[in-house]
Amino acid sequence: MRILVVTAVPAERDAVLGGGAVPGVDGVPDAGADARAVSGVDAVAAGVGPAAAAAGTAAALARTAYDLVVSAGIGGGFAGAAPVGSLVVADRILAADLGAETADGFLPIDELGFGTGVFDVDPDLVERIAKAARGTVLDVAVGAVLTVSTVTGSAARAAELTRRHPRAAAEAMEGFGVATAAHAAGVPFCELRAISNPVGPRDRDAWRIPDALRALGVAAAAILPELREERA
Ligand SMILES: O=C(O)c1cccc(C(=O)CC[C@H]2O[C@@H](n3cnc4c(=O)[nH]cnc43)[C@H](O)[C@@H]2O)c1
């Protein structure tokens, strides 16, 4: 059975396929072209943001039949839920800024009656992924992963997102796009985020991108073979 992994950038794609070796840090060249494969797993770097993620996923699904689509990459972790170096497995993928601002606050697209900004991930899939990942990285959290078009850069915005989504464990920029394309094609999907930075006030010194890529790689090396076998 075939799995499609969709990342934003080539470094994430190569980390997923490299089992924890980090391109450009551990002597692994960052290969650059969009698509890469290991047995049963194709990985594509589709670009940053939900639109690029949806377009890249839809294009890959139009070329090849897959049984599962995995949105994978680094992300920001919410305080108390996902520390830097941990892995978040999404049980819910939601578009946190898809909606309308009103005098009474933000209205999600679901409440506006224009479709949905929420996808739930198959609970059995979530459990299998979390089980496979435990012990490979610092910590594994299961929770909601928010898709945003603007990286959170203030304590006020982080607090607002936490108030609106108390189960939020991570934020990133692609999961909802990947899930939208996979759902439209009738293919199961999930999302994995290795935490590179806390969600909150902007602090570039706090980013731990090589550590997060390493965590993403070692977790993926445990998760993907397990899923590939289970779905065979
Ligand atoms: O300039 C900044 O302050 C800043 C802080 C964190 C991340 C960025 C990015 O441009 C990276 C976007 C890229 O990485 C994923 N990512 C990683 N951390 C976060 C985050 O805290 N919030 C949202 N996305 C994050 C994201 O999925 C993109 O692929 C800039």
Image: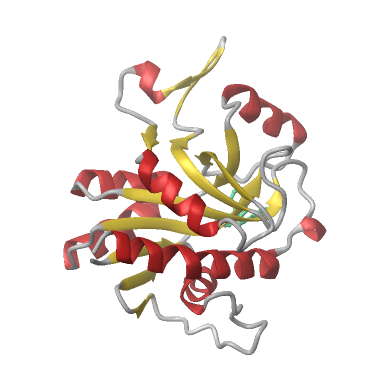
Vertical comparison of 183 with 164: above or below:
below
Name the residue at 47% across, 58% down. Answer: 72
Vertical comparison of 17 with 52: above or below:
below
Q: In which quarter of the view is residue 93 placed?
A: top left
Q: Nearer the viewer, residue 68 or 137?
A: 137
Q: Is residue 70 visible?
A: yes
Q: Quadrant of the N terminus?
A: bottom left
The colour scheme of the drawn protein is: secondary structure
Q: In which quarter of the view is residue 7 placed?
A: bottom left
Q: Position of residue 221 (x, y in %)?
A: 49, 70
Q: Position of residue 160 (x, y in %)?
A: 66, 26
Q: Nearer the viewer, residue 113 or 143?
A: 143
Q: Position of residue 106 (x, y in %)?
A: 53, 20
Vertical comparison of 31 with 174: above or below:
below
In the rendered view, does 207 fall on the left or right side of 226?
right
Name the residue at 55% across, 88% down. Answer: 29
Question: Which of the four quarters of the rendered structure image does ligand 1 lie in?
Answer: bottom right
Q: Is residue 45 visible?
A: no
In the rendered view, does 151 fall on the left or right side of 129?
right
Name the residue at 37% across, 22% down. Answer: 110
Name the residue at 37% across, 47% down. Answer: 125
Q: Position of residue 215 (x, y in %)?
A: 62, 65
In the rendered view, does 155 fall on the left or right side of 99?
right
**Number of marks in the rendered image:** 0
Vertical comparison of 97 with 65: above or below:
above
